[in-house]
Image (tube, helix red, strand yellow):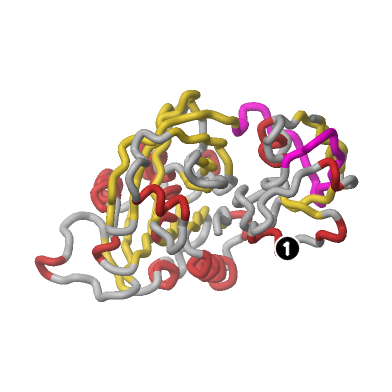
Amino acid sequence: MKVRVRAKNDKFEFDCREGESILYAGLRNGLALPYECATGTCGTCKARVREPATIGEGWIEAPGNGYLKRERGEFLMCQICALADCEIAVPANLSRTSAGTSRPAWTQGRIRNLRHLTHDVVAFDIAVDDPMDFEAGQFAVVQVPQVQGFRAYSMVNYAKAARSLEFVVKKKPDGAFSDWLFGPGAEGADATVFGPLGNAVFRPEEERDVLCIAGGSGIAGMMSILARGCRDGYFKSHKGNLFFGVRTMKDVFFLDELSSFAAAFPGSLRITIALSDEDVPVGDERPNGPVDFANGFVHAVASERMAGACDDITAFIAGPPPMVDGAIRMLIVDARLPASQVRYDKFS
């Protein structure tokens, strides 16, 4: 099917496969359509169709539908497939992706190396059939036959032409995908992957210091950023600060990996784990190593320790929505950091 797009600045056209969402088809064809979560939650990818009969219905219960005016023909591009040639209007200026940018693509894979990091956090790899180029901080959407719908997860690892994508997932109440991962049968299961996606990426050529604020499984993309920064020696000449928020010590994961990052660049890469629900352990109960610990909500700890030190940085934020909102307010309102230097992707 042909999808014709009327944007504020120009007209575009691309092919859409049967059963493929309009958003994924456009991105795959190099059109920079607006999106954030790409899974029906945020409402960013809304568009308007001229003839409603040319598109499907999609996920009716998608949270992002609450931002739509159905009477005007609005729909979520990430949830809707074209049923025939159609024309849509997107309320934004659009462009083609620049040369050298990795376009998202479809690939198949298998879940491997499933392991429990804490009582409610699991990590796994997807061995993909086609290598994927992605930037540190990007994510992919994943679907398995056993669970309806796609889920968005940031890659933990960083590699060019990656044959394996590493993810971490926190168990959520009534979370169909996380319930399936924690049950039997996930190891070796087939998976469909579309990516890479996301704009909260680390660009070393910007030559800025790095600040990462993460809560829970939001640490995933930050691990990718640190992996690239350490691999390329970025922290030899730039400062890095990572603040990782969890509830208690039993909720801490990736401590060995974070310690290795900090030990590789002492003095320039500082890593702090913030415990929101208990005091920092003392004496023999406190883990040895270069990672520091603090008590409090992670954005508050970051605000206190970064006071007066937020000039010329790029900040990355990921985690539960209240934490992300608090960190954004701290950085833009209190630290007066330009919004262009604060990066995050809405997953929920």
Spot the residue most to the right: 50
Residue shown at 39%/70% (left/top)? 301
- Residue 205 percent location from the top left of the image: 53, 39
Q: Secondary structure at mark 1?
A: helix
**Left or right position of 8 against 31:** right
User: Is residue 278 placed above or below 142 in the rendered structure?
Assistant: below
Q: Is residue 319 something one can see in this rendering? A: yes
Residue 102 shown in magenta: yes
User: Is residue 311 placed above or below 166 in the rendered structure?
Assistant: below
Residue under label 1, please give it. 67
Foreground pick, 175 / 293: 175
Magenta part mainly helix, strand or loop? loop
Residue shown at 44%/33% (left/top)? 190
Q: Is residue 237 something one can see in this rendering? A: no
Foreground pick, 279 / 68: 68
Residue shown at 58%/67% (left/top)? 332
Foreground pick, 140 / 187: 187
User: Is residue 331 placed above or below 186 in the rendered structure?
Assistant: below
Q: How packed is label 1: few (under 14 Cα within 10 Å), some, or many (20 or more)?
A: some
In the rendered image, which quarter contains the N terminus?
top right
In the rendered image, which quarter contains the C terminus?
bottom right
The residue segment tinted magenta is 81-104
Asked which quadrant contains residue 125, the reply is top left
Residue 147 shown in magenta: no
Residue shown at 32%/45% (left/top)? 184
What is the count of numbered marks? 1
User: Is residue 338 placed above or below 7 in the rendered structure?
Assistant: below
Spot the residue most to the top: 130
Which amino acid type is marked by label 1?
A: Tyr
Spot the residue most to the left: 284
- Residue 117 percent location from the top left of the image: 28, 51
- Residue 234 percent location from the top left of the image: 40, 41
